[in-house]
Image (spheres, rainbow, N blue to C red):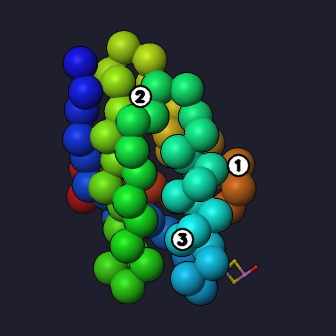
Amino acid sequence: TIKNIKTSVTGMTCAACANSLETFLSELEGVDSVKINYADQSANISFYKDLISEDVLNDAAAKIGYGLILGT
Ligand code: 9UX
């Protein structure tokens, strides 16, 4: 089952941050698509619920210095 979420993103200080976070999250197993909006400091992520979770996505983002504000 695919789940779509929109979250606020912390830690992005330039447009290249958005691109690197987008690429990084896109490559995780179970992620279907990632669209980061730098101007909006937000992310639209769709993923297979059976393969990955919001918490795992957030932990992954945190490893490279960003945060996903789940539930926003
Ligand atoms: Mo450049 Mo955005 O290192 O952090 S990608 S400021």
Question: Of discs 2 and 3, which sits in the foreground?
Answer: 3
Please name the residue that numbered disc 3 is placed on.
18
On-image quarter of the N terminus? top left
In-image side of 28 versus 53 (left or right): right
Residue drawn at x 25%, y 27% as measured from the top left: 2
Depth order, front residue of 60/69: 60
User: Within the image, what quadrant is residue 59 found in?
Assistant: top right
In terms of secondary structure, where does tag 1 sit?
A: helix
Instruction: Determine if residue 34 is in view.
Output: yes
Q: Nearer the viewer, mark 3 or mark 1?
A: 3
Above or below: residue 47 compared with residue 20: above
Q: Neighbour class for label 1 at 10 Å: few (<14), some, many (≥20)?
A: few
Q: Quadrant of residue 29?
A: top right
Task: Give how far across and how far down residue 26 sits, in percent.
Answer: 52, 45
Q: Earlier in the sequence, mark 1 or mark 2?
A: 2
Q: Return the x and y of residue 13 as percentages of the image width and height.
A: 59, 84
Q: Is residue 21 above or below residue 54?
A: below
Please name the residue shown 54% across and 71% down the image.
18
The residue to which callout 1 is attached is 63
Q: Which mark is residue 53?
A: 2
The amino acid pointed to by label 1 is Lys
